[in-house]
Structure formats: structure tokens, C-alpha cells
Image (tube, grey):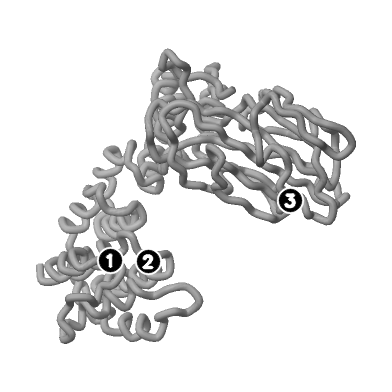
């Protein structure tokens, strides 16, 4: 209880500086503050090491408090706090002590906490009492923590597989459908879709992920000596679809483009050929049902930039270092109604076969990876145009 009151005081005085308003002789709060204040490039590491030594001698009742301190912590601070929890947890087990199971459970079930410490709380519960953890798993199916809902989906996959073995295929299809609706991790989604297709069911992964498939493309512009990433070409000044721009050899205009790739791959090589040292632009309009936070999730192995409604979101001047779904997660704020997304993709001079790709995939989702779909004027979901 004492540690909980201390944490409340810390939260009230501000997460950015735990020591403000805290008694100087309160070693626990000062130690938590030291871990919270650690930063990149070694900032605060000495104080954090000293704090770790003190916190490692804390009792098991400190665990929920340290988990709460992970809320809003930067990655460096979170790693220190996670380490402190592990040390206390393991020490308690070695000494034959019992863990605060109820408090851990209450922390887990409180969805106002960050997803990573909640996932850690579940792991501690499972390591303490696997039976209790197993009983909690079904309730995690729609959890905002993708790590936690993965547990529930894995349970459904076992159930569905058993139903297939028992020749109860209709029931298996329904369980797989339930699992697919909740799944956010690519490996689980691919497993589920494969099983459903084996059972004769159609699966629309493009719709499930929310990939944007209908675009307008314009190019090519130059990328000589990789200068195209920084150069401001016409579409960055005016992205109206009826605009004509000066390209490499001639004036260029926007072309309609639609991909039927299941994972929404937009391939500049299709309309323009396997060109090198070039830049292309892709534009689409996403219609949001409301003003809301969202994420643009991009996969691309070329150098790229993204704008939303004319404002630069982010860019990365890097080439051919691999590509995967959700490679880059970009938090944005959608406006109610039309939102214009503009992507710049630069192809470099390399000639190796694995450098031919001049492409990207993009989807719009919430922070859990749940697809957000563009709507029509009538409110129904539509393919993005």
C-alpha cells in the first residue's frame, strides 16, 4: 500500500520528473525516479544502476508499483523497470515466497495501463500459477494488447484444429473466423487464412489488413546521385490530379493504378518499367468517418516520404534493406471526410536483381493494428480511390 501511495504522488507531480515534490529521504520513490529519468546515449545510467541495486532488495509488494511506473516510460527506462521487476520476482520465487497474484491480476485487467507492462503482468501470473493464467486467456481475445490477444487466438487455433480432426468442419470454420477477426500478428493471420481456405472458405486479407489498393501514380522524376529524396518535385507543390509536371524526358501526368495483390503491393515498375535512379509519386484519398487518431503502416525497401493532407509525416532515405508488412508505423490524425495521402518512392542506381523492386504497401489502422476502412458518402466501406 505504501508503494502505491508513493506512485500516486509521483503521477500527480508529473511523469516527466518523478523527483519533483518527493521527499528526499524516500529512497524507493527516488530510485523509481532514477529509472524513469534514464535516457538515450547513457543519460542517467549511473543513477539508474544505483537505483537498480536498491530496488532489487525491495519486497514483492513493489512489483505492481514498478509495473505502473512503466506507463509512459521511454524504452530505456522501461527496460530498467522491467529488469527490476524480474529481479524481485525471481528472488521471491527462490526464497519460496508467494507473489501478489490478485494485485497482478487487477493490474492486468486494468486496460488504462500501457500494453507492455500488462503483458508482463500476465507473464508473471502464468509463471506464478499457470492454472489462473489459463482461465484468464479467453477474456483476452479483444484485448488492446496484441501480445495478450495472441494468447487467446492461439487457444482458438488449437480448438479449431481439434474440431477439424473430429470432422466437425462447420464448427471449425466458425472458430477460425472468430480467431481471424481478432488476429493482428501476420503469422497467425496467415495460418488462419490457410486453414480456412483448406476448408473451402474465401478469405479477403486485403480487407482484413485494410491495405489501400486504388491509387494515382505519376513519374518518373530523376534520382541522379540519390538527390531525388531531397529535391522538391512538382507533386510536392501541387498534387491535384489534373496537374502536369516536368519529368525526366517529358511532361508527365497522373495515371490511375489499382493493385490486386493480396497484400496491397503498389509496383511502380508495372506502369513505368524497371527503371533505375528515378522517383515516383503515389496519391490516394482516404475518407474517414470521423476525426480520429490512426496509424499509417508502410512497407517499403526504397527511400520514401509520406504526406497527409499536405503535411510531411515522415521519410527515410534508405535503400533495399528489406521489406515487411507494418515495417514503419506512423501515428497520424485523420480528419473527418477526405484525407489525401501522398507517397514519394525513390529508386537508386544499384543493378543487382534484388534491387529491382520499386514498390510499397500501405494500410490505415488503429494502434492495435485493427484496419480502419475508407467510407463512401453513404457511410459504407469502400476500396480507397
Residue in the image at 32% along x and 41% along y? 143
When asked about the image quadrant of residue 340, the answer is: top right
Given this view, does label 1 or label 2 mark the residue nearer the observer? Answer: 1
Which residue sits at x=25%, y=62%?
68
Q: Is residue 152 rendered to the left or right of residue 250?
A: left
Q: Position of residue 150 (x, y in %)?
A: 40, 43
Q: Which residue is mark 3?
A: 231
Outermost residue to the left: 1
Res. 157 in view: no
N-terminal of the pair, mark 1 or mark 2, is 1
- How many numbered discs, if any? 3
Q: Nearer the viewer, residue 82 or 91?
A: 82
141 up-or-down from 323: above or below:
above
Residue 250 placement (x, y as % from top left): 87, 33
For residue 239, say whether it is visible: yes
| Dot in front, 3 or 2 | 3
For marks 1 and 3 on the same chain, the one whose residue lies earlier in the sequence: 1
> Which of the labelled discs sits on residue 309, or is there none?
none
Residue 17 vertical position relative to residue 223 in the rendered view, above or below: below
Residue that mark 1 sits on: 15
- Determine the residue positioned at 18% across, 85% down: 24
Tell me if residue 129 comes above or below residue 98 in the rendering. Answer: above
Along the polypeptide, which appears first: circle 3 or circle 2? 2
Q: CA distance from mark 1 to mark 2?
A: 13 Å
Query: Where is mark 2, residue-wise?
Result: 78
Tell me the mark number nearer the camera, choosing from 1 and 3: 3
Q: Quadrant of residue 21?
A: bottom left
Q: On the rendered structure, is 282 left or right of 160?
A: right
Tag 1: Cα neighbours inside 10 Å, few (<14), some, or many (≥20)? some
Looking at the rendered structure, the secondary structure element under dot 1 is loop
SS under mark 3? loop
Amino acid at each position: 500500500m505504501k508503494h502505491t501511495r508513493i506512485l500516486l504522488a509521483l503521477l500527480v507531480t508529473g511523469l516527466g520528473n518523478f523527483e519533483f515534490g518527493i521527499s528526499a529521504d524516500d529512497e524507493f520513490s527516488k530510485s523509481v525516479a532514477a529509472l524513469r529519468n534514464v535516457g538515450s546515449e547513457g543519460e542517467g545510467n549511473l543513477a539508474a544502476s544505483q537505483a537498480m541495486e536498491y530496488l532489487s532488495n525491495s519486497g514483492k509488494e513493489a512489483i505492481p508499483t514498478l509495473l505502473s511506473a512503466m506507463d509512459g516510460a521511454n524504452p530505456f527506462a522501461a527496460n530498467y523497470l522491467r529488469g527490476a521487476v524480474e529481479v524481485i520476482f525471481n528472488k521471491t520465487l527462490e526464497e519460496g515466497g508467494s507473489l501478489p497474484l490478485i494485485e497482478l491480476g487487477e493490474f492486468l485487467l486494468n486496460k488504462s495501463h500501457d500494453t507492455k507492462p500488462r503483458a508482463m503482468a500476465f507473464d508473471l501470473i502464468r509463471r506464478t500459477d499457470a492454472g489462473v493464467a489459463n482461465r484468464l486467456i479467453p477474456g483476452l481475445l479483444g484485448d488492446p494488447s496484441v501480445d495478450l490477444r495472441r494468447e487467446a487466438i492461439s487457444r482458438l487455433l488449437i480448438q479449431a484444429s481439434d474440431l477439424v480432426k473430429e470432422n466437425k468442419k462447420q464448427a471449425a470454420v466458425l472458430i477460425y473466423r472468430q480467431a481471424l477477426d481478432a488476429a493482428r500478428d501476420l503469422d497467425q493471420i496467415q495460418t488462419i487464412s490457410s486453414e480456412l481456405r483448406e476448408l473451402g472458405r474465401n478469405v479477403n486479407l486485403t480487407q482484413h489488413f485494410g491495405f489501400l489498393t486504388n491509387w494515382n501514380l505519376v513519374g518518373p522524376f530523376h534520382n541522379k546521385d540519390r538527390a531525388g529524396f531531397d529535391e522538391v518535385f512538382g507533386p510536392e507543390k501541387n498534387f491535384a490530379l489534373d496537374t502536369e509536371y516536368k519529368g525526366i524526358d517529358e511532361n508527365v501526368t497522373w495515371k490511375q493504378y489499382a493493385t490486386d495483390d493480396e497484400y496491397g503491393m503498389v509496383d511502380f515498375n508495372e506502369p513505368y518499367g524497371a527503371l533505375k535512379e528515378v522517383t515516383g509519386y503515389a496519391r490516394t484519398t482516404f475518407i474517414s468517418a470521423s476525426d480520429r487518431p490512426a496509424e499509417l503502416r508502410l512497407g517499403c525497401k526504397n527511400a520514401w516520404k509520406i504526406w497527409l493532407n499536405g503535411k510531411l509525416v515522415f521519410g527515410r532515405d534508405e535503400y533495399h534493406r528489406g521489406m515487411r508488412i507494418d515495417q514503419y508505423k506512423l501515428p497520424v490524425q485523420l480528419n473527418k471526410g477526405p484525407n489525401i495521402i501522398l507517397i514519394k518512392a525513390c529508386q537508386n542506381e544499384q543493378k543487382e536483381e534484388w534491387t529491382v523492386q520499386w514498390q510499397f504497401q500501405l494500410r490505415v489502422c488503429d494502434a492495435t493494428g485493427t484496419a480502419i476502412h475508407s467510407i463512401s458518402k453513404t457511410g459504407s466501406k469502400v476500396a480507397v480511390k
